[in-house]
């Protein structure tokens, strides 16, 4: 019986030609009808593999030994150019570890994995996401791996978009309520560290926003919220920040070394907006901030949010600088027109103007 490499080279579009070539390869005497029929069958099988719509490659020792047309199309090259290439050349760095672990599992003789492996590959056409499924085989008498690939780039992009939409607010681009609360809930989970840092949050509630909606309409209000979202994202940097709903936002201070006073001043500065209205006067949109802290494993999510909310409303009522609240509350501050200080940080007297609708 011919080797695997041999039958793949036999053209099968013309069965008579396949038979002639096969008989030539079997000149040692294998000319019985049964052997001839087997050679033709193998030739046809090779043709089916070559023309299969499923991208297939065979590799051993990390080197590609054979690839069909579909695999070459996925990897933006030709079958001839693929043969002899290192498999890792086409796998993006972030996916190489997963690929190597899967290959070791297959070559180790254990149970073949029933699931697929998702990998990022790089080609001359760019990056794409593929799913791969592999099985142990032989090639020219040596152990090899036969892998089948599917391009799932579009499907992965759609899934990522759906995942983003599930955790983010469409208007502001910030995390939505479920997204930010999931992060906070994880931060409050019990920890084995005896001296775990407290979990600090800042509740942000806009002041003057209702007047914008009443005088200029909801479209202008949405523009303000979108602008506040962009400013919060920039001011918070890598800190988790989300929109709880309406004009209320939450920031999780997950950096222990972060200075509360300086950050709150920076945050209030970023949010303050002066809005021009048709009668020539201005509306100032500021924010009331409530800062609270809780202990991982000891403070519940609802308790910490309640403390921050109470701190924020005390600030809103008092109009004064930060003051101590409950055991959980660290500080509260009020920003109104940018004319009051915050824990010794003087806010700007001239908020940025927003021209209203138009």
Image (spheres, rainbow, N blue to C red):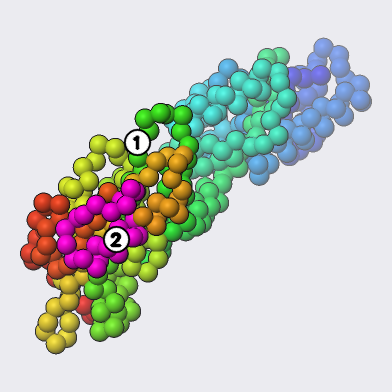
- Tell me the residue at 24%/52% (across/down): 324
- Tell me the residue at 42%/48% (across/down): 184
Horizontally, residue 104 falls left or right of residue 96, namely right
Pick whichever, 121 or 40, lies toward us: 121
- Tell me the residue at 66%/23% (across/down): 106
What residue sits right under mark 1 in the picture? Answer: 197
The location of residue 218, given as percent across then percent down, is 33, 79
The location of residue 146, given as percent across then percent down, is 66, 28
Image quarter where the C terminus lies is bottom left
What residue sits right under mark 2 in the picture? Answer: 312
SS of the residue at dot 2?
helix
Q: Which residues are magenta?
A: 308-329
User: From where the camera sits, is residue 4 visible?
Assistant: yes
From this view, report whether residue 76 is shown above or below residue 334: above
Rendering quarter of residue 65: top right
Horizontally, residue 271 falls left or right of residue 137, namely left
Image quarter where the N terminus lies is top right
The location of residue 75, given as percent across then percent down, is 51, 38
Pick whichever, 96 or 180, lies toward us: 180
Q: CA distance from mark 2 to mark 1?
A: 22 Å
Horizontally, residue 301 falls left or right of residue 26, namely left
SS of the residue at dot 1?
loop
The location of residue 238, given as percent across then percent down, is 31, 45
Pick whichever, 266 or 66, lies toward us: 266
User: From where the camera sits, is residue 11 visible?
Assistant: no
From this view, report whether residue 155 is shown above or below residue 142: below
Residue extending furthest top?
28
From this view, report whether residue 208 is shown above or below residue 297: below
Q: Does the magenta run of residues contain 320?
A: yes
Pick whichever, 311 or 24, lies toward us: 311
């Amino acid at each position: 019986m011919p080797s695997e490499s041999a039958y793949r080279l036999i053209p099968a579009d013309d069965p008579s030609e396949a038979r002639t070539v096969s008989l030539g390869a079997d000149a040692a005497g294998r000319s019985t009808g049964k052997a001839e029929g087997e050679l033709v069958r193998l030739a046809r099988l090779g043709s089916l593999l070559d023309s299969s719509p499923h991208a297939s490659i065979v590799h051993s020792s990390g080197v590609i030994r054979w690839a069909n047309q579909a695999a070459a199309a996925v990897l933006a090259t030709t079958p001839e150019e693929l043969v002899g290439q290192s498999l890792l050349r086409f796998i993006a760095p972030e996916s190489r570890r997963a690929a190597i672990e899967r290959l070791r599992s297959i070559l180790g003789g254990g149970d073949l994995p029933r699931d697929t492996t998702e990998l990022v590959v790089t080609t001359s056409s760019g990056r794409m996401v593929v799913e791969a499924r592999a099985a142990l085989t032989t090639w020219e008498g040596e152990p090899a791996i036969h892998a089948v690939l599917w391009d799932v780039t579009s499907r992965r992009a759609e899934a990522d978009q759906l995942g983003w939409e599930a955790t983010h607010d469409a208007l502001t681009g910030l995390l939505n309520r479920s997204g930010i609360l999931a992060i906070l809930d994880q931060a409050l989970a019990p920890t084995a560290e005896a001296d775990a840092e407290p979990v600090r949050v800042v509740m942000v509630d806009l002041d003057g926003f209702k007047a914008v909606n009443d005088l200029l309409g909801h479209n202008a209000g949405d523009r303000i919220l979108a602008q506040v979202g962009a400013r919060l994202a920039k001011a918070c940097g890598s800190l988790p920040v989300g929109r709880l709903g309406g004009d209320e936002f939450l920031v999780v201070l997950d950096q222990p070394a972060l200075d509360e006073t300086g950050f709150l001043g920076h945050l209030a500065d970023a949010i303050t907006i002066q809005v021009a209205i048709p009668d020539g006067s201005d509306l100032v949109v500021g924010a009331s901030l409530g800062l609270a802290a809780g202990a991982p494993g000891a403070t519940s999510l609802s308790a910490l949010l309640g403390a921050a909310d109470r701190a924020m409303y005390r600030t809103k009522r008092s109009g004064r600088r930060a003051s101590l609240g409950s055991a959980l509350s660290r500080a509260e501050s009020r920003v109104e027109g940018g004319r009051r200080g915050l824990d010794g940080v003087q806010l700007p007297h001239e908020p940025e103007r927003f021209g209203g609708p138009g």
